[in-house]
Amino acid sequence: MKKFISILLCAALAFAACQPVNPDKDDEVYQGIKAKVEMSSADPIPADGGQLVVTVTDSPAFTVSFPKTATSWLSVSQAENVITFTANANPSAVLRYASVSLIDQELKIAITNFDVMQAGTAKDVEPVVYKTFSVTPESISVAAKDQSTVFVVNADDEIGWTVTSDNPAFVAAPASGNGSKSVTISFPANEIQSEVTANITVSTEAENVRQQSFTVAITQAAAKDEKPVVKPAPGTVLAEWYFAKSQLDVLKTNFTIEVSHDLADAAGNAGAYVEPNISGKGRLEYYHGVDKAAAGVVDKAHKRCKRIIGTYGEPCVYGTYKQDYILWTAYTENEAPIAAGTKLHLFFVLRPNNEGVMKYWLIEYLDGDEWKPALPVTDGDGFQYNIELFFEEGAQTNTEIEPTVTLSKDTDAAQFRITCTSSMGTGGSDISVINAAWALRFAGEDCNANHPEYSVKRHPIIDVVE
């Protein structure tokens, strides 16, 4: 009879190994043959069912033993030293296994053991599809005299949202809505010499958005020290621009709003402007009068509006429409108010590239805090205008705009506003949808060599006549 006191199992598979004898004990080790196993695959049996074949070598006669709890899904057949395990489909996502022992038929003890494993069923988990909800921009700075600003809520049509303000003087319109919209925040001019702030929170209760609230931080500049009114000398240039190919990089610094920009279609100027690049202080800005996507004049899936500096250094606006306006601004050297009696002069040139660019515009100037016509006004069919743009017989046409006005009141800055007052295009047809190719150019010195007539030899300027 073979002697033994205890049997240390020889581990099978990758992790089983024969354990060393403890020298502190007077034990004898198993004197029988040590079994070896080779599996047909190192991977678990597939979740949809299958077989695992185990070949046993260097072994005495043996029987196979595994838990009764596994017999519901696992069956075994044996042909001498080859064991075949067959597993049913596993409906669970959890991997399952059975611990198998090979039993020496003479000694009735385990000569090796290993696990038969089966993979769990991969569950189809629906990925979370997040809905659009955000605001742009999340911080806004305004001047002390400003009384409104605009931001955009970007949201899928089914997303409802509300707007709240931590400063009651800053009022939102609309205060709630669905989908993408421009939100106008109105507030009083700041008359104190410290900044005024407001945190405007836009929130939603909709599920499957990455974030349910956003805050737009508005900072209104402190009121400036009152400066004495000045009357600039005749011939003083308050601001002068130079639109040419050589100036391309300078001009486009703050005037590049592509169609993909969050504010490309939104009401306001999208933060875009062109500063004087010859002399003086001021800005040229183009404002959308309404949110064009919300108004339905542009396809929401295909934005049409943009502001760029063209190849020849000309500021270009794509997507002109009724209520849009151009704003020219110029300041005195120390930004002091301009005295009543000052005569101001503006010169610039507009050129539409297509019959879909808006035709009728009204130019006004700021006199104190009142806007007044800068040129004689003509009555149209339900609108007024004093600028008419042309695109006749497929030809682009430059229109020179050159008003001279006299201030009757002290005025903070020289400002001229040119507002589109009709939705009629230069081709004579009413425009209901904006086309991506229709551009209004502020004409400059350089132009396509095939069209020298486009060139403008005088620069845009705001100066003092007397």
Image (cartoon, rainbow, N blue to C red):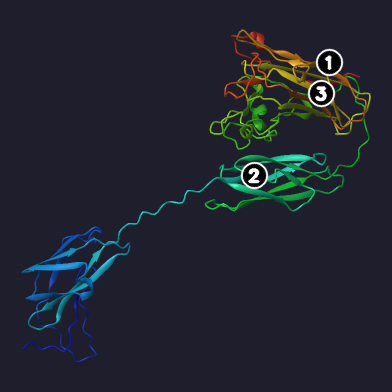
- Return the residue at label 1: 376
* Camera sees residue 460: no
Query: Which element carries disc 3, helix, strand or loop?
Result: strand
Hey, which quadrant is residue 245 in on the image?
top right
- Whole-percent x, y for residue 115 in the image: 22, 70
Q: Mark 3 to mark 2: distance in Å?
A: 34 Å
- Whole-percent x, y for residue 10 in the image: 18, 76
Q: Are marks 3 and 1 in contact (CB under 8 Å)?
A: no
The C terminus - image quarter: top right
Q: Mark 1 to mark 2: distance in Å?
A: 41 Å
Q: Mark 3 to mark 1: distance in Å?
A: 10 Å
Amino acid bearing label 1: Pro
Can you tell which mark lies on residue 173?
none
The relative height of residue 181 versus residue 356 in the rendered view (above or below) is: below
Amino acid bearing label 3: Glu
Q: Outermost residue toward the bottom?
A: 26
Q: Nearer the viewer, mark 3 or mark 2?
A: 2
